[in-house]
Structures are given as structure tokens and as C-alpha cells.
């Protein structure tokens, strides 16, 4: 589960990670009040107005602005709230901004020049250990740094049996070239960050940039925290932070029906039971000349209700020109699925796109018979190659 930057910073602060003073605002007027409160707490020379969406690269899209007066704070907030922010991670459609984070400006210069660094913690699946990644190239796309200058990526693996050790945090701080007070503060910063990572069941924590301030403190200037969905049952406070406006409506609706749905850009909708079969089905769609419009796994308990919910979700995508239902009858019987398809079809009403139903496994022949004798515009298939051919024909007819 993704959370907003302001939520991530609230969590990290609870574990001792230093963050700039910041207040979230939903309106320009709230943004001004937030700026006033921050000014009362710290003598900041300016404020930063930051769009809050679940995507990185906000600054490149105009979603991060500096303001030197309260009037500018209001103007920046008016410009950002309600905008359709397009970043490298949002796609061409962008995301609408509903709120902004007002923070102090931590870049003011004192005796020393501030430095931007990169720190992240994530699971290295190859080694089965958590890894701390760091770089002196903070504020940049870390993927680009890794590709062009991999020697600038520092990695330190943590043994899960003993957890992070102080010497490991020191090693990272030393390799970042930090000395004196900045080195000591980075050690504390890394240990606190790792404590937060473990306690929140995070799958990733990324601080980009982590700022070495002019007075040698280390701050999480930005923060991205992803939480493992499988652990949300024991992270109820974090689960309550979920922002449904940041998620695709179809994916939210699918979750309400216990369906696993991911929207794609193709023209053939697919409904399958099992993630592995769903991947194979998408391959078949591509080989047949189509493009998958979604990943939809109805799980092992497919019935009339789940099939109907799946139909409705798929058909909300105007790009879908055909639907392939591919069910392997193991836990669920094919005849039960077939009855579910027929019942769902009748409940929905008029469906003007081809539907191919491929049933295999327990009671597959009985299921095909139910489909064929239903009188509906639904074609059945038992073999995967038959389903692929029917998808090819349906797609070619649509494209003709």
C-alpha cells in the first residue's frame, strides 16, 4: 500500500527520523495558515509547497514550488491544488492533486553548503536480506545513477537474525563522505530509519533526498514509504491512511469484491482464476493479435456474484472490444462457473462485445454445454488454442 509523503514523514518521525516541519493543507487558505504556524515554530526564510500524490518526480511536473511570502504560498497552493500533475511515474494522464504539504525551507545556507544524499531500505530477494542503499547523488533518479555510475551506489546488507548493527550504519555514513557531526547524525538517521522499516512492515522506504543541512543535521527532505499489503492486518493505523482517490476506481471496486484487478492499456478483457493462469492468458491474448486490457483474478471461489462483478469492472473500460474468460476447474467446478456467467450476463443486460469462455478441468464439458445452450452471445472453448483462435477472430472483426 502506498501512502502520501506527509503520512510517511509522520510515521518516520515517531521512530526518531528527523523531518522538516510540515503541515498538510486541502485549500489555499489552509496552506496560508499552515505557513504561519511553521513560521511561529522556526525562522524559515521561505516555504515549500508540495503536491501530495502517489508518484515521484513531482518537481519535474511543476508540483513542488518555493514561496517567499504568505501571498506566494497562497498562489502556489492555488496553482497546484486541482491541477492534473503529470510526472514520469503517473503516465500521460497524470493525477489530480487534492492536497499540498507546506514545509519549512531547509536549504538555507549557513557556514556549509547543504548536500543532497540518497538513502533507501528494501528487501533484496536474491539474498533474502534487507539492504540499505545509499548514494551521494541525492535528488536524482536513482535508476539513472545506477545505470550510468553504478560505483556511486553504496549497499549494506542486514542479517535478519541480528538486525542492523551500529558499525554498518557507520560504514554507510563513512562511504557517503560524511565527517564529524554530520557522520554521527547520519548513523542515528539510518538506525532510526531501519527501526521504522521493520516496525511498520514496510516493503520499501526511500528518502530522496536526505539533506545534510548547513549545520550538519540529516533530514528526510522527501519520503516514500510502501507497506506490505499482507501485513496490513497488523498495521491498522497505517491501513486507515489509505487514500482511495489515488487509486483507480476499478481497482477499488475490485477490492470490495475480493478480486485482484490491475488495469492495462489493451483491448481484450480477461477474467481468470489464479495469478499464474492469468499471466498465461495474457500471453495467449498477445499471441492471438490482441492486447490484454487488464489482469483480473477471481480466485478459487468464482461464482455468479464474482463473475458479475468482474464483468461490470471490465466493461467500464471503453477500450475493451472482447472478453476472454479462462477458468480451470479445480477448487471450483466449471458448470458452476458457467451458470455464473449465464446469470451475470442476464443481470447486466445488453452486452455488445464478444465473450469467449474457456473452461477446463472438473465438469468442463457440462460447463461448455450450459454456455452453448444458454442462447446468449457467448462462445465456449475447452482447449486453450481454441480460445486463442476465437479471440483472434473477435479482435480481427473489431479491427476490420
Image: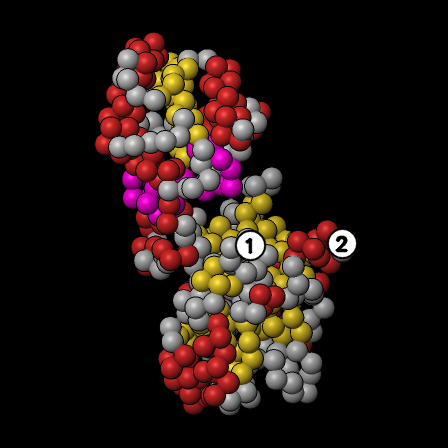
127 relative position to 395: left or right: right
Residue 336 appears in which quarter of the rendering? top left
Looking at marks 2 and 1 on the same chain, the residue that comes earlier in the sequence is marked by 1
Please count the marks in the image. Answer: 2
Judge whether 12 appears above or below 370 on screen. below
Q: Residue at x 50, y 78 (%)?
A: 76
Q: Position of residue 144 (x, y in %)?
A: 70, 55
15 relative to 380, above or below = below
Residue density around tag 2, few if under 14, some if 14–19, many if 20 or more, within 10 Å: few
Say if the magenta span includes residue 245: no
Instruction: Name the disc covering residue 148, or none.
Output: 2
- Give, as a single range, the part of the protein colored magenta: 251-269
Outermost residue, front side: 400
Residue drawn at point x = 41 percent, y = 79 percent: 28
Q: Is residue 254 magenta?
A: yes
List the single residue furthest toward the top: 365
Quick check: 230 above or below 24? above
Residue sitting at x 31%, y 17%: 371
Marker disc for residue 92:
1
Amino acid at each position: 500500500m502506498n501512502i502520501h509523503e506527509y503520512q510517511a514523514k509522520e510515521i518516520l518521525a515517531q521512530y526518531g527520523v528527523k523531518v522538516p516541519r510540515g503541515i498538510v493543507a486541502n485549500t489555499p487558505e489552509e496552506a496560508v495558515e499552515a505557513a504561519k504556524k511553521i513560521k511561529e515554530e522556526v525562522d524559515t526564510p521561505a516555504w515549500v509547497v508540495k503536491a501530495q500524490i502517489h508518484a515521484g518526480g513531482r518537481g519535474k511536473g511543476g508540483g513542488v514550488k518555493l514561496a517567499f511570502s504568505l501571498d506566494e504560498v497562497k498562489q502556489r497552493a492555488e496553482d497546484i491544488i486541482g491541477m492534473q500533475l503529470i510526472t514520469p511515474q503517473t503516465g500521460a494522464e497524470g493525477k489530480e492533486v487534492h492536497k499540498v504539504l507546506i514545509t519549512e525551507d531547509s536549504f538555507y545556507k549557513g557556514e556549509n553548503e547543504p548536500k543532497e544524499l540518497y538513502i533507501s531500505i528494501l528487501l533484496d530477494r536474491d539474498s533474502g536480506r534487507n539492504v540499505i542503499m545509499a548514494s551521494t547523488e541525492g535528488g536524482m533518479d536513482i535508476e539513472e545513477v545506477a545505470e550510468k555510475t553504478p560505483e556511486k551506489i553504496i549497499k549494506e546488507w542486514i542479517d535478519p537474525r541480528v538486525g542492523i548493527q551500529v558499525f554498518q550504519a557507520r560504514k554507510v555514513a563513512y562511504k557517503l563522505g560524511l565527517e564529524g557531526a554530520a557522520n554521527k547524525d547520519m548513523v542515528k538517521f539510518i538506525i532510526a530509519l531501519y527501526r521504522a522499516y521493520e516496525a511498520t512492515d514496510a516493503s520499501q522506504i526511500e528518502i530522496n533526498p536526505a539533506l545534510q543541512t548547513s549545520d550538519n543535521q540529516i533530514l528526510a527532505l522527501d519520503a516514500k514509504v510502501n507497506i506490505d499489503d499482507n501485513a496490513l492486518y497488523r498495521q491498522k493505523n497505517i491501513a486507515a491512511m489509505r487514500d482511495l482517490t489515488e487509486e483507480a476506481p476499478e481497482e477499488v471496486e475490485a477490492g470490495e469484491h475480493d478480486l485482484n484487478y490491475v488495469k492495462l492499456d489493451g483491448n481484450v478483457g480477461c477474467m481468470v482464476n489464479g495469478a499464474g493462469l492469468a499471466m498465461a492468458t495474457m500471453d495467449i491474448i498477445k499471441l492471438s493479435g490482441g492486447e490484454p486490457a487488464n489482469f483480473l483474478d477471481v480466485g478459487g471461489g468464482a461464482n455468479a456474484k464474482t463473475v458479475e462483478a468482474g464483468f461490470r469492472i471490465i466493461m467500464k473500460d471503453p477500450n475493451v472490444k472482447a472478453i476472454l474468460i479462462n477458468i480451470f476447474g479445480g477448487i471450483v467446478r466449471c458448470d458452476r462457473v458457467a451458470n455464473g456467467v449465464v446469470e451475470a450476463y442476464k443481470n447486466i443486460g445488453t452486452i455488445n462485445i464478444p465473450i469467449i469462455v474457456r473452461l477446463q478441468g472438473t465438469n468442463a464439458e457440462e460447463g461448455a454445454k450450459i454456455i452453448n445452450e444458454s442462447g446468449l452471445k457467448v462462445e465456449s472453448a475447452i482447449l486453450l488454442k481454441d480460445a486463442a483462435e476465437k479471440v483472434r477472430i473477435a479482435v480481427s472483426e473489431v479491427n476490420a
